[in-house]
Amino acid sequence: MRALPKPIVAAVNGVAAGVGMSFALAADIAIAAKSASFLQAFARIGLLPDGGSTWFLPRLVGEQRARALAMLAPQIPAEQAKEWGLIWDVVEDAELMKTATELARRLADGPTLSLARIKEAMNRAGGNDLSQQLDVERDFQRELGRSEDFKEGVAAFLAKRKPELQGKVGRDDHDDAAQGKSPRACKFPEGPGRHARRLGDPGRDRAPDADPRHARRQAARHRQAGRRAERRGHGARAARSMLTNNGGFNWIERPGRPAVPGTQSGRLQGRLDPGGRSRDRQVRDALRLAATAAS
C-alpha cells in the first residue's frame, strides 16, 4: 500500500482489530466513523502485531503509546485515535462513505504527479537523515518543475482561474517515452547529503575531491589522459595533472620544458618556470594541453 504511487483513503466504520488496524495505518489518509474503534488484538492470543504495525505505531504515537497498544491491547475509540494521531478525522456514521468518496475524488482530480512524489518522499523520510531528505526534495522538485502540471498551475495562478491538471510529465520525458526509454528517474546520493554544511555539520559536507573514491577515479582519468598523450608523442609526462585533496596540482610539465625548479614531489610552489610563466599561467596551460591531448 505504501509503495503504490496513488494515494489511498481508508474509511473505518467499525472495529479495526489486528491486521485490520494495520491496513488503516498503512493508508495515506484514514477517516473513521464516530462509532469506530481500534484494537491491536495480537497479544490477546499470544502473537505480536503484524501487517506493519510495529513500524507504523512508534512513528505515529511514540514509543510509550505504541508499546502499550501492542502489549496491553486496549480498544480505543475513534476520537482518541484522532487525538493520538492514528487517523486524520472523525465524522458522523452516516457521512463516512460520502466524506471518504469526496476526499478520494479530490485527490484523483488533483496534481497526481505531485501527490505520487509527496508519497514517495514521505516513504523515504523514514530511512533518511535531514540532509539526505533535503536532497530527495531537491531532486523531486526538479522533476516536478519540468512537468506540464507545473506549467498549467503557474498559468492558472496568474490568470486567477482553476488549474486543469492532467498528470502529464515534461516534454523531455515524453520524448524519452517515444523512444522506448523510461522517464528520467531521480538518483539519490548514497552517502551524506550536500546540505550538511548549512545544517551546522561541516565535516559531513566534504568537497568531491576530498572523497577517496573520487580521488581514485580522478587519478585513473588523469593516467588515461597521460597515456593518450604518450601515444600522440607529447612525452611521457606531458600535461598531466593530479588534483590533490587540498586543491594543489602535481606533475605540471610541458613538452620540452623541465619541471618547475625548487618544487617538492612535483608540487608547484608559486615560482616561475624557465619560461617565465606564473603559477596560474602554468596551471591554465597544463589544463589546456591536457584537454587537447584527451580529445
Image (cartoon, rainbow, N blue to C red):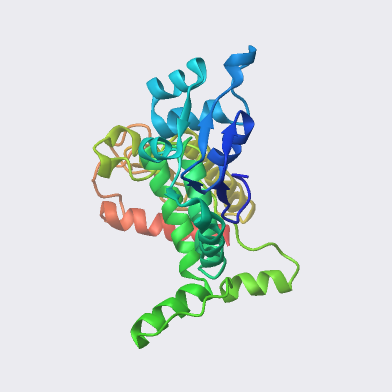
Q: How many marks?
A: 0
Residue at horizontal 57%, vertical 71%?
167
Considering depth in this image, is 180 or 12 the residue closer to the camera? 12
Residue 232, compared with residue 49, is above or below; it is: below
Q: Does the image show residue 212?
A: yes
Residue 79 point in image, percent of width and height: 40, 40
Q: Is residue 289 above or below residue 17?
A: below
The residue located at (33%, 54%) in the rendering is 282
Q: Position of residue 197 (x, y in %)?
A: 28, 41
Does the rendering let one see residue 250?
A: no
Q: How far across and how far down the image is residue 50, in percent?
A: 62, 26
Between 23 and 54, the residue placed more toward the observer is: 23
| Above or below 278: residue 246 | above
Q: Residue furthest right?
A: 180
Whole-percent x, y for residue 225 in the image: 56, 50
Identity of the residue drawn at 41% across and 82% down: 156
82 or 113: nearer the viewer: 82
Q: Residue furthest top?
A: 46
Q: Quadrant of the C terminus?
A: bottom right
Residue 174 occupies quadrant: bottom right
User: Is residue 288 or residue 113 the one in the foreground?
Assistant: 113
Which quadrant is home to the N terminus?
Answer: top right
Q: Is residue 147 above or below residue 67?
A: below
Q: Residue at x 51, y 35 (%)?
A: 37
